Image (cartoon, rainbow, N blue to C red):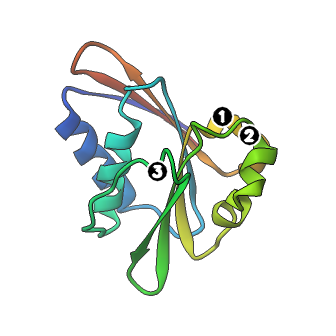
Amino acid sequence: MIKEIKTGSEQETGIFAENFAKAIQCGTVIALHGDLGAGKTVFARGFAKGLGITENVISPTYTIIQEYRIKDRKWFYHLDLYRIKDSNSALAFGADEYIQSPSAVSLIEWAERVPELLPPDTIHIEITHVSQNERGIKIQN
């Protein structure tokens, strides 16, 4: 199934992601695709808020993986693979353990760098620039 929407601001993108997250179950992997500055981290912040996370969510560009506790001993793993060359590099960081965790929701920025690590039921979200403020969001699952 493919769903496409447009948002007119960062705030709208965040609100959409927040509402989207409320329907996501543990064990789900979300692959975020888009150019630099497309809004992947804005989406991740809204998504985290929808999971009940109140901490400041920043892109883990240098740390690669950021862990956030959600209710009932569950986790939200935010991975940013921009600095990762390929799946072998990601495996060196233990990314597969995060991606395969049944007690977590994993959201991966730059997921196209590790296609062979993504489970078949991964939800792919592509964010594109429509104009300076507008973003196109295409969800495929």
- Mark 1: few, some, or many residues within 10 Å (few <14, many ≥20)? some
- Mark 3: few, some, or many residues within 10 Å (few <14, many ≥20)? some
Going from the N terminus, do you reach mark 1 or mark 3 first?
A: 3
Q: Residue flagged by tag 2: what amino acid is it?
A: Pro
Q: Where residue 77 sits: x, y (%)?
A: 51, 62
- Contact (Cβ within 8 Å) of mark 1 with mark 2: yes
Residue drawn at (56%, 51%) of the image: 64
Q: Nearer the viewer, mark 3 or mark 2?
A: 3
Q: Nearer the viewer, mark 1 or mark 3?
A: 3
Q: Residue flagged by tag 3: what amino acid is it?
A: Pro
Q: Residue flagged by tag 1: what amino acid is it?
A: Glu
Residue drawn at (71%, 62%) of the image: 94
- Contact (Cβ within 8 Å) of mark 1 with mark 3: no
Query: For the residues marked 3 and 2, what is the alpha-carbon distance in whole angstroms?
Result: 19 Å
With 91 as the anchor, is 7 left or right in this view? Answer: left
Query: For the residues marked 1 and 3, what is the alpha-carbon distance in whole angstroms?
Result: 17 Å
| Up/down of 74 relative to 134, above or below | below
| Up/down of 3 relative to 50, above or below | above
Foreground residue among 51 and 112: 112
Q: Secondary structure at mark 1?
A: helix
The residue identified by callout 2 is 115
Which corner quadrant of the image does residue 134 belong to? top left
Query: For the residues marked 1 and 2, what is the alpha-carbon distance in whole angstroms?
Result: 6 Å
Q: Which mark is residue 60?
A: 3
Residue drawn at (29%, 70%) of the image: 52
With 97 as the anchor, is 60 left or right in this view? Answer: left
Q: Where residue 107 sits: x, y (%)?
A: 51, 53
